[in-house]
Image (cartoon, helix red, strand yellow):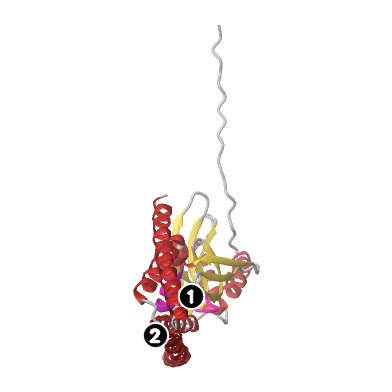
Amino acid sequence: MQANTEAATVNDASADNAGNLFQQIKSQLAEYLTNPEMLIDVAQSLLLAVLIFWIGKRVAQFVSNMTGKGLAKSGNEVILVNFIKSVIYYIILAAVVVMALGQVGVQTTSLIAVMGAAGLAIGLALKDSLSNLASGVMLVLTRPFKKGDFVEVAGTAGKVTELKLFSTILHSPDNKELIIPNGQITSDVITNYTTEAKRRIDLVIGVNYEDDIKVAKQILLDTISNHPAVLADPAPGVMLKNLGASSVDFNVRPWVKTEDYWMVYGELMEQIKLNIEAGGCSFPYPQQDVHLHQVVQPEK
């Protein structure tokens, strides 16, 4: 409610400034039409204003392009380069327009006031979008992820396909397109699964209490060590984790290349089951002992 009131106040101020500027231009045109000699001066001023605008526009384009090339050579993201180029171009172009209008006799003070009030009104009306814009710039500058990374952001996981100024586009493992506002990403934890070259697979494997835990541990260690995609450095490890209610649980932790994670995960789960059973051990089922007591009613 407060933001709407502020925006309405700014709009009223902008309308008043625009009205004053229009009245000023109208009075000057009337003065020029009543004095033929002034028309020549107006034509010259107008021609000079057009020349200023023509040259200024090209200067703005040149400066923005040179800035973009410099940023690109420095290895900056394309989205940041394009954003800065656009900002520089429109700032210079706005200054050129003010200079050109001043050349034809328009008081630039009123024009600047109109532009400032309009900019403030737009900012208040689009504060959420501007927040996403600022977050998009921060993501480009800090680079927590890049195109092709598999990330978890704002409670959603997927592969990054595009980073825009206002939103980030992911593709989920089942090939759904996910569009996430940048503001939600920067305000939450960002988990990047593909930044590092290696990942550890964490498995919890339980065996029966009746099994020899040394034999079970060796079977698990041999299984993960013999897989061709499991890395020797860091060395894979197996350790007793927990004496559970119905099983003895082991932590099984092999290291693999990041791109091999899910392939090795599935193959190890299958091979562990086969090797555990072949080695004489077994996987327990959840068990619960039920004790029945017979209640003897006393004789009357």
195 up-or-down from 281: above or below:
below
Give the spatial CA distance, label 1 vs label 2.
65 Å
- Structural crowding at the residue carrying mark 2, measured as other residues with C-alpha within 10 Å and reported as few (<14), some (14–19) or many (≥20): many
Residue 47, x across and y down, in percent: 47, 90
> What residue would you read off at disc 1?
199
Front in this rendered view, residue 27 or 87 = 27
Looking at the rendered structure, the secondary structure element under dot 2 is: helix
Q: Which residues are magenta?
A: 133-149
Q: Is residue 22 magenta?
A: no
Q: Quadrant of the rendered structure where residue 44 is?
A: bottom left
Residue 209, x across and y down, in percent: 52, 54
Q: Quadrant of the rendered structure where residue 172 is?
A: bottom right
Q: Quadrant of the rendered structure where residue 45 is?
A: bottom left
Q: Disc 1 vs disc 2: Cβ atoms closer than 8 Å?
A: no
Residue 76, x across and y down, in percent: 44, 86
Residue 177, x across and y down, in percent: 62, 68
Residue 214 can be seen, yes or no: no
Q: Residue at the spot x=59%, y=59% of the render?
A: 282
- Structural crowding at the residue carrying mark 1, measured as other residues with C-alpha within 10 Å and reported as few (<14), some (14–19) or many (≥20): some
Q: Quadrant of the C terminus?
A: top right
> What residue would you read off at disc 2?
103
Closer to the observer: label 1 or label 2?
Answer: 2
The amino acid type of the residue labelled 2 equals Gln
Front in this rendered view, residue 222 or 44 = 44
Label at residue 246: none
* Count of numbered badges drawn on the protein: 2
The amino acid type of the residue labelled 1 equals Arg
Mark 1 / mark 2, whichever is N-terminal:
2
